[in-house]
Image (cartoon, rainbow, N blue to C red):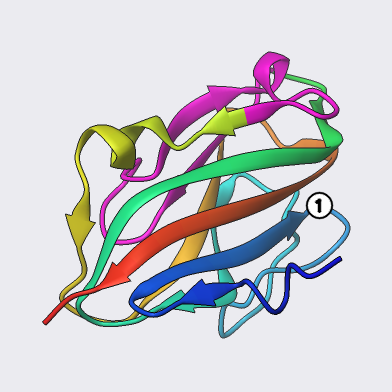
Amino acid sequence: DNFDSLASLPGLHITKFTFDTAANDAASTPASNKTVAAHPLAVTIPDNAIVISGFVDVIAAVTSNGDATVAIHLANANDLLAATGKANLTLAAQLPMAAVIAAPIKLTAEKAVTVTVGTAALTAGKIDGYIIWIEGA
């Protein structure tokens, strides 16, 4: 396993994040990741980064007693992954961050990766995400 040594090539970066419903978010007043809310993570992407791609790897199926959705963003709502229903977040699902692939974004400040749980609270789930970005000026 040489993923750590290959994490970045000059100018090209892959930043990994994990969203786990068993944990709390990184807000100034931490909240359970299960709640309907925007959950900032401790992982950030730097100022001037040009985000060009990414994907989500579902490690444990996202479940809910309702019609929960999960969205991922940096600068604006849904700019990485639009609200996605739990039915699409099943064990081992691989989802492209289609929003940013279609329209890359350049950050104007360092931004935390934020996962937004919508419609209904989650009961379980864990996803790893990989954001692919290049250095901008």
Q: Is the residue 65 above or below the residue 112 in the image?
A: above
Q: Is the residue 111 above or below the residue 53 in the image?
A: below
Q: Residue shown at 21%/69% (left/top)?
A: 107
Q: Is the residue 116 above or below the residue 25 in the image?
A: above
Magenta segment range? 67-94
For the N terminus, the image quarter is: bottom right
The spot of residue 92 in percent (x, y) is: 82, 29
Q: Residue reaching furthest left?
A: 137
Relative placement, left or right, of 47 versus 1 is left
Q: In this orientation, which residue lies closer to the viewer: 94 or 37?
A: 94
Q: In this orientation, which residue lies closer to the viewer: 109 or 54?
A: 54
Disc 1 marks a residue whose amino acid type is Thr
Quarter of image, res 79 = top left
The spot of residue 84 in percent (x, y) is: 54, 25
Q: Residue shown at 11%/82% (left/top)?
A: 137
The spot of residue 30 in percent (x, y) is: 68, 76
Q: In this orientation, which residue lies closer to the viewer: 2 or 133?
A: 2
Q: Is residue 29 magenta?
A: no
Q: Is the residue 112 above or below the residue 60 in the image?
A: below
The spot of residue 48 in percent (x, y) is: 19, 78
The answer to whether residue 69 shows anywhere in this view is no
Identify residue for label 1.
21
Helix, strand or loop at label 1? It is: loop
Q: Residue shown at 69%/22% (left/top)?
A: 86
